[in-house]
């Protein structure tokens, strides 16, 4: 049956190609202006995101008369979709990117640099929260993306468990954090097995591992990148060891966490009452709400005391928005970016997606005061966050470094060696891989 | 493939009968038309097969040959995120990607050869076990008994399931903390004291093998059962009358009969397994644990995580050459030649 099917399949492919080619890009400045917008998936599902974004886009259409064709793309696909769009030129007009990709994507030359009139068209640099604006591209070059949603890590804790253990305050220093976590690691039903852990993490997640290596590394006074990878510097080794020791030495993390890698499982443990604390990004609140869980409090991420480095608590996380240079309607595309980053829309979007507004003026809005946690997140993002190194190799760095840390968690969980030497060896190995692939 | 398996069980051609038409050859004309018309007719008919093959050949060119050639070209360029936008003009770097990626002394080359060796071991394990299971089931289900149809259907279920479903269900089952496998081993049977990890560390390789076999063996079963059914019952009866034991009947009748089918089944399963990407990706995510890192996911990592398409393509080109060479040797050695 194969042969007769092939021409049919080919004809379909050809038709689909033709359709795609004719449908791509904006319509220029004709009567019927239409923009294509690729949005990242922020809420609990693609469908939910479409529901949230549609009213915001309708308001844009009302103001400008420009229609917006929306496609919400899951995170697992977004990177490859952008890549394909860059190479084929068959791209949307406006799109969202993870802000850690900004420098990589900047290098492709496929995005409009925000400078001069183009920057003014989206509200100017002063519109944006400084730490978030700094994630727009490599330092010293005009950014090719501006922030859209601000995010930061924070310490989430279960107040009921704290109360039960007689702990009144969330830990502020790393030492207190470890002591608190040890206190909260318990066998609650007396069957001889620990069923409540002090802390949960995604041991197999390259993202969380590399982000925490960065944050804790900065606290130790280290850096991940200095003209090349510096993963195995003494400061970074200390930082990574400190992170892995939560499982290996202090035993406050369930060894099963070494398998967690999809970004939802540690939160699952927290929601299920199997762990008392997690360090996750603010947007996690949407999935907690989805699961009907609201019994949590939020505090700043613990910091070393004495502090040899910087009081960094989080990466300047978030989602940025870019315009493709191939857009047929640059003016319209910039207007859409302006609209979505305007204080009014920022208030709406940040409430819906549990993110932080990236427009300074949005913080004056009273509606945001209703969110009791907003101030904590805002403080962390505005005062204690730094962008991940803005280098074209960032994506690769997160993978290689995160994988090395995940390997250490696997060792810790299976009773292997996670001594300082083992940590250094793993990080040196990761450095070699980075250098080789360069 | 030009050398398809010949059925040994094909009935002998009666003496004096015309040979069957080969593929594409015109059947003999029923009557003798005038010479001029005959010539035109012959020309038309000799073009017909080409016309019929043309669409498939064109699509083959578009869908397989051109992308493959492009992939080989990319292996000689420095195609990264810097150059992807105008990828046709990416700088030509000669053998640099090959030197970098395939040098056993370098970090990348060492990782490649390690995962290449691992992939060979994985392929041998998966194909061997799948074949053995498939063969056993095919022999068992070749005789008639009640419930045979039901069992046949049941055996095909793993093959019919989408790989995504298979992988998700298995990750639930082998989860360290709540998985049913550890529950069985530790809580129910008490075989182990501690719950072992299956998706990280050394065990990950064996989980990959088990899941791959689970998914693949029904294919071997299906193909071998089809081959077995071409053996007339009388042959087995005759062997039984001659006093052949069950084992003897298996080695002297069954195996020779399914030999041509075996050749194809092993080749196809070997190629599929060697190139396996979906399962490790779904079981372990973007990067597999060291113990289970196969070659295809490694190439993916270089191309789509590290954005070094030239390097990924160079590694793929090496695999292509290795697989084509291995397949060609295998076909010459194992598959039956077409009789002249």
Image (cartoon, coloured by chain):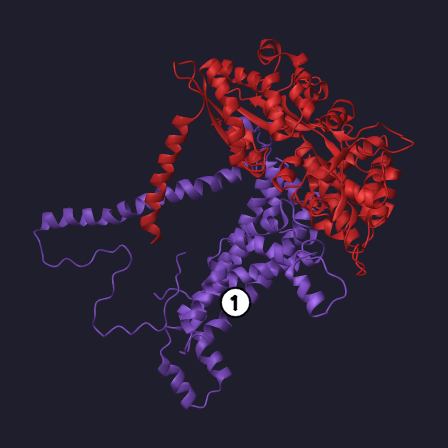
Chain colours: A red, B purple
Q: Position of residue A380 (x, y in %)?
A: 76, 27
Residue A13, placed above or below residue A185: above
Residue for point 37% across, 42% down: B59
**In which quadrant will I find the N terminus of chain B?**
bottom left
Residue farthest along the right direction in this orientation: A306
Q: Where is residue A97, by image quadrant? A: top right
**In which quadrant will I find the C terminus of chain B?**
bottom left
Q: Position of residue A250 (x, y in %)?
A: 85, 48
Q: Position of residue B41 (x, y in %)?
A: 15, 49
Protein chain holding label 1: B
Residue for point 39% across, 65% down: B5
Residue beneath label 1, please?
A: B131
Q: Residues within 10 Å of mark 1 (few under 14, many from 20)?
A: many
Q: Tell which of A2 and B71 is nearer to you.
A: A2
Q: Where is residue A161, by image quadrant? A: top right
Residue for point 68% across, 32% down: A393
Residue B160, placed above or below residue A50: below
Residue A109 seen anywhere in this rendered image of the structure: no
Residue farthest along the left direction in this orientation: B34
Q: Tell which of B306 and A244 is nearer to you.
A: A244
Q: Position of residue A379 (x, y in %)?
A: 76, 24
């Amino acid at each position: 049956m194969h042969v007769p099917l092939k021409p049919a399949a080919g004809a379909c492919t050809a038709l689909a190609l033709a359709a795609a080619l004719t449908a791509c890009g904006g319509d220029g400045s004709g009567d019927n202006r239409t923009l294509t917008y690729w949005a990242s998936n922020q809420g609990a599902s693609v469908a939910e995101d479409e529901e949230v974004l549609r009213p915001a886009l309708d308001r844009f259409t009302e103001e400008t008369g420009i229609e917006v064709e929306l496609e919400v793309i899951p995170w697992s696909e977004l990177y490859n979709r952008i890549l394909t769009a860059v190479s084929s030129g068959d791209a949307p007009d406006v799109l969202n990117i993870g802000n850690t990709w900004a420098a990589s994507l900047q290098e492709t030359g496929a995005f409009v640099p925000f400078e001069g009139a183009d920057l003014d068209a989206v509200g100017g640099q002063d519109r944006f929260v400084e730490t978030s604006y700094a994630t727009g591209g490599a330092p010293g070059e005009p950014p090719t993306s501006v922030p859209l949603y601000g995010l930061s890590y924070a310490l989430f804790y279960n107040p009921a468990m704290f109360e039960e253990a007689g702990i009144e305050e969330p830990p502020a220093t790393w030492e207190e954090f470890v002591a608190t976590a040890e206190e909260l690691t318990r066998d609650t039903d007396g069957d001889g097995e620990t069923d409540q852990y002090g802390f949960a993490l995604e041991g197999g997640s390259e993202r969380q591992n590399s982000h925490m290596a960065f944050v804790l590394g900065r606290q130790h006074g280290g850096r991940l990148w200095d003209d090349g990878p510096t993963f195995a510097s003494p400061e970074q080794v200390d930082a990574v060891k400190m992170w892995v020791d939560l499982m290996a030495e202090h035993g406050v993390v369930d060894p099963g966490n070494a398998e967690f890698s999809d970004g939802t499982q540690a939160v699952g443990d927290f929601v299920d009452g199997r762990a008392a604390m997690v360090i996750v990004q603010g947007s996690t609140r949407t999935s907690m709400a989805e699961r009907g869980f609201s019994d949590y409090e939020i505090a700043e991420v613990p910091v070393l005391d004495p502090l040899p480095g910087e009081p960094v608590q989080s990466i300047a996380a978030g989602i940025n928005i870019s315009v493709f240079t191939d857009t047929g309607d640059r003016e319209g595309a910039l207007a859409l970016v302006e609209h979505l980053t305007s204080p009014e829309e920022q208030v709406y979007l940040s409430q819906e997606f549990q993110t932080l507004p990236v427009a300074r003026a949005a913080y004056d809005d009273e509606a945001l005061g209703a969110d009791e946690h907003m101030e904590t997140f805002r403080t962390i993002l505005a005062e204690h966050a730094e962008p991940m190194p803005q280098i074209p190799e960032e994506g690769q760095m997160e993978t290689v470094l995160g994988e090395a840390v995940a390997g250490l968690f696997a060792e810790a969980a299976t009773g292997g060696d996670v001594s300082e030497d083992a940590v250094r060896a793993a990080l040196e190995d990761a450095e070699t891989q980075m250098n080789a692939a360069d | 493939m030009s050398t398809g398996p010949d059925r040994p069980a094909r009935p002998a051609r009666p003496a004096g009968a015309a040979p069957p038409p080969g593929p594409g050859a015109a059947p003999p004309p029923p009557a003798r038309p005038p010479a001029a018309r005959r010539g035109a007719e012959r020309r038309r008919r000799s073009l017909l097969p080409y016309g019929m093959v043309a669409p498939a050949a064109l699509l083959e060119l578009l869908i397989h040959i051109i992308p493959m050639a492009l992939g080989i070209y990319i292996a000689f360029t420095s195609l990264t995120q810097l150059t992807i936008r105008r990828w046709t003009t990416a700088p030509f770097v000669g053998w640099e990607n090959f030197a970098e990626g395939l040098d056993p002394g370098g970090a990348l080359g060492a990782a490649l050869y390690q995962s290449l060796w691992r992939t060979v071991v994985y392929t041998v394990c998966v194909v061997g076990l799948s074949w053995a299971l498939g063969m056993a089931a095919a022999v068992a289900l070749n005789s008639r008994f009640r419930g045979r149809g039901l069992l046949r259907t049941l055996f095909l279920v793993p093959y019919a399931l989408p790989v995504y479903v298979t992988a998700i269900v298995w990750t639930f089952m082998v989860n360290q903390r709540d998985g049913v496998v550890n529950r069985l081993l530790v809580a129910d049977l008490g075989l182990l004291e501690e719950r072992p990890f299956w998706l990280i560390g050394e065990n990950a390789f064996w989980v990959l093998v088990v899941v791959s076999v689970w998914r693949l063996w029904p294919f071997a079963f299906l193909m071998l059962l089809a081959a077995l059914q071409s053996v007339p019952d009388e042959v087995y009866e005759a062997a039984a009358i001659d006093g052949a034991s069950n084992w003897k009947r298996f080695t002297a009748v069954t195996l020779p009969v399914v030999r041509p089918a075996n050749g194809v089944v092993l080749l196809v399963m070997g190629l599929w397994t060697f190139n396996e990407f979906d399962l490790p990706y779904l079981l372990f995510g973007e990067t597999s644990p060291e113990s289970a890192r196969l070659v295809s996911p490694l190439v993916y990592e270089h191309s789509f995580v590290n954005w070094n398409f030239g390097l990924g393509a160079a590694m793929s080109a090496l695999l292509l050459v290795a697989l084509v060479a291995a397949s060609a040797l295998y076909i010459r050695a194992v598959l039956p030649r077409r009789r002249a």
